[in-house]
Image (cartoon, helix red, strand yellow):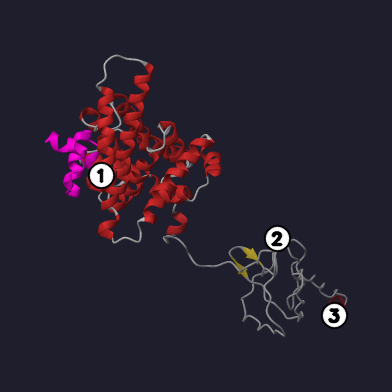
């Protein structure tokens, strides 16, 4: 009896379990009421006791086991068979505990991920970036490469002239700069090789109106095929008739402006001004600011574009079959006159500065008539006819257009036959 009395006294003096401090609650939310309930100790994955709240929170007070004194601090807790989990009582919406950094603490999952594949995660971030960059460059090059593909199509057909080199060189320089800035080293090398082929062809070319043939043509085609293999999204051939017409039309209109040469083409195409529609909307001051060209030259370019569009608007009320035939006949008569004037000056003997100036002016006037005929044919959709005129002599051009229109425009043309 004495021993039982001592145990009774000992248990009566045992301090009550300390209340666990409440976990912090997310700002703006009301704390759920705490209902004290006995929680059995569970041993899972080597952890002692059930984790409550965020990591580092206070552990529940240790309770004595019936018939045994409470374990001392730091001593292992005796194993106990897990009993049924208590049913939580909730009086409001359930709020997941929030960690110190704002993350929600979730119970660890027991699922095994061994052998599972996650394609979106396993793919390298570099691969995803390269695909996006490649797609971006393809979008950039879609419009820029259209004239170049037109040139290659003409080159394969053996009717590309040297003036195409003035168009393609600045376009390729812009594309190389874009590819370099995007880090596309695989595309830069073949593009530079194609530019080198363009430069070699320009050095061996006798004139802008002469066809590109022989070794220069073979080198250009080989270099472009290598480029198309590396980057088919931008440089594969196909679907170019419309872009070919637009490029030829812009070139014919620009060449009508005195002073336009390689530097002008470099500036315009380098600024992505590659269509008549774009230039028609530009003001000469804005054009000068964007390209760095002289304001008088930009003014002359805008005037040439507007003059051409104005002539089309003046003829718009006529039927389609009459809209261009009358203008072509008028231009053909002018071409025959300017060609006769050039040959008279060219046939003069002796040399002086005044004669050289008259010859340059006669050549300029004759070329201007030929370019206007080419632009009109392109507006009609006669791309092949306009293309064929470029490689013919002026006598043959007059004859070709007479046959095309079914007229005889000059006595000289009839005598030539």
Q: Which residue is mark 1?
A: 386
Q: Let me know if residue 408 is in the magenta part.
A: yes
Tell me what residue is drawn at x 35 percent, y 20 percent: 356
Q: Is residue 71 depicted above or below 306 in this figure?
A: below
Secondary-structure class at tag 2: loop
Majority secondary structure of magenta residues: helix
The numbered mark at residue 101 is 2
Image quadrant where residue 388 sits: top left
Tell me the residue that label 3 is attached to.
Answer: 8
Q: Secondary structure at mark 3?
A: helix
Q: Is 298 positioned to the left or the right of 209 in the image?
A: right
Mark 1, other Cα within 10 Å: few <14 / some 14–19 / many ≥20: many
Residue 244 % position (x, y): 31, 47
Q: CA distance from mark 1 to mark 2?
A: 72 Å
Q: Which sits in the foreground, 39 or 268?
A: 268
> Could you classify mark 2 by the number of other residues whose Cα lies within 10 Å: few (under 14), some (14-19), or many (20 or more)?
few
């Amino acid at each position: 009896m004495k021993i039982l009395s001592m145990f009774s006294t000992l248990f009566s003096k045992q301090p009550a379990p300390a209340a666990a401090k409440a976990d912090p609650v997310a700002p703006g939310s009301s704390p759920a009421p705490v209902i004290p309930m006995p929680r059995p100790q569970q041993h899972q994955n080597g952890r002692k006791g059930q984790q409550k709240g965020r990591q580092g929170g206070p552990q529940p007070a240790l309770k004595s086991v019936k018939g045994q004194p409470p374990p001392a601090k730091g001593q292992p807790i005796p194993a106990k068979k897990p009993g049924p989990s208590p049913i939580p009582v909730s009086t409001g919406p359930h709020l997941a505990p929030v960690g110190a950094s704002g993350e929600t603490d979730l119970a660890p999952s027991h699922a095994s991920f061994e052998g599972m594949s996650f394609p979106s995660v396993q793919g390298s971030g570099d691969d995803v970036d390269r695909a996006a960059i490649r797609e971006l460059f393809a979008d950039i090059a879609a419009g820029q490469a259209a004239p170049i593909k037109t040139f290659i199509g003409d080159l394969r057909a053996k009717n590309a002239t040297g003036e195409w080199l003035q168009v393609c060189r600045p376009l390729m320089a812009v594309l190389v700069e874009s590819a370099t800035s995007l880090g596309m080293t695989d595309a830069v090398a073949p593009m530079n090789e194609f530019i080198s082929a363009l430069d070699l062809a320009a050095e061996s070319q006798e004139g802008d109106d002469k066809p590109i043939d022989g070794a220069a043509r073979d080198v250009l085609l080989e270099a472009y095929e290598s480029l198309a293999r590396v980057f088919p999204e931008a440089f594969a051939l196909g679907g170019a008739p419309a872009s070919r017409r637009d490029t030829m039309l812009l070139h014919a209109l620009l060449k009508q402006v005195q002073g336009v040469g390689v530097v002008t083409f470099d500036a315009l195409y380098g600024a992505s001004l590659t269509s008549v529609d774009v230039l028609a909307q530009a003001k000469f001051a804005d054009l000068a600011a964007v390209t760095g060209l002289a304001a008088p030259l930009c003014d002359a370019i805008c005037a040439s574009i507007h003059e051409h569009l104005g002539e089309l608007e003046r003829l718009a009320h006529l039927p389609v079959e009459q809209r261009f035939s009358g203008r072509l006949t008028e231009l053909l008569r002018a071409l025959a006159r300017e060609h006769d004037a050039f040959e008279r000056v060219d046939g003069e003997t002796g040399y002086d500065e005044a004669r050289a100036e008259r010859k340059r002016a006669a050549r300029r006037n004759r070329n201007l008539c030929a370019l206007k005929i080419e632009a009109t044919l392109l507006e009609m959709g006669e791309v092949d006819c306009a293309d064929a005129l470029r490689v013919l002599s002026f006598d043959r051009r007059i004859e070709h257009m007479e046959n095309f229109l079914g007229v005889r425009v000059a006595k000289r043309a009839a005598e030539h036959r």
